[in-house]
Amino acid sequence: MNVCLADKIDALQISAIHQKELGKSFLSSLGAPFLQKFYEAIISSKHSFCVVAKEGNIVTGFVSGVADINIFYKFFFQKYFFILIPIFLPKIFSFNAAKKIIENIFYPQKIKNLPPAELLAIAVEKEFQRQGIGARILEKFINEMKIRRIKVFKVLVGKEMDSVKFYEKSGFQKIKEIDLHDKEPSIIFIYNLT
């Protein structure tokens, strides 16, 4: 197994894993075309990156993150605005979907006192889980954050998600709980690199 930074050609496989393994997440609800563009942006921006585990050319797991969530969102919407219009257009007519999109874009304003760097998502294909892949890609992710001189980063995770235990076991500290989407509590963890 090879653990390395993702290439743009990996975005399709990464988005498929995200959709499959993180199906209850808000980003998954935006669909595969959105996820593919989202991961293309993460891979191509100098303010973000994605680490993958690969068996040959097959991506088996990934972890993505940003040095500054606000700068990344600005890059993403500037670069993909016209591509995203047909993806978002049907969602805008759904009040709940439009509300969640706005909440996600502006949630960093709710937590201004926390670091701008963020782990966005981590997932491993079901058949490759429980083999230490999550720990290996997280280790590479942490090293990449160090290379970028990030001293601390956060992660926002739904309180009911299985990954809460993974973060606790991996040395993340619980900072607080917030309600991002109508009574759906999330936990904010931070990881200190110093």
Image (cartoon, helix red, strand yellow):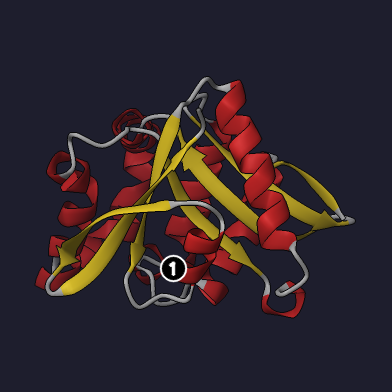
Q: Which residue is drawn at 32% across and 32% down?
A: 116
Q: In the image, residue 159 lies at what x, y percent?
A: 32, 72
Q: Quadrant of residue 144?
A: top right
Q: In which quarter of the image is residue 186?
A: bottom left
Q: Which residue is drawn at 32% across and 33% down?
A: 115
Q: In the image, residue 71 lies at what x, y percent?
A: 33, 28
Q: In the image, residue 167 lies at what x, y percent?
A: 49, 60
Q: Residue at x 29, y 61 (%)?
A: 187
Q: In the image, residue 139 lies at what x, y percent?
A: 67, 45
Q: Nearer the viewer, residue 107 or 138?
A: 138
Left or right of 108 on screen, residue 191: right
Residue 94 visible in the shown view: no
Left or right of 140 on screen, residue 159: left
Residue 86 visible in the shown view: yes
Left or right of 87 on screen, residue 139: right
Where does the N terminus fall, quadrant-wise?
bottom right
Q: Which residue is drawn at 60% across and 43% down?
A: 50
Q: Nearer the viewer, residue 87 or 139?
A: 139
Total number of numbered labels? 1
Left or right of 39 on screen, residue 184: left
> SS for tag 1?
helix
- Number of other residues with Cα within 10 Å of mark 1, as a class: few under 14, some 14 to 19, many 20 or more: many
Residue that badge 1 annotates: 164
The correct choice, above or below, for 67 with respect to 173 in the image is above
Residue flagged by tag 1: what amino acid is it? Val
Q: Which of 20 and 182 is in front in this view?
A: 182
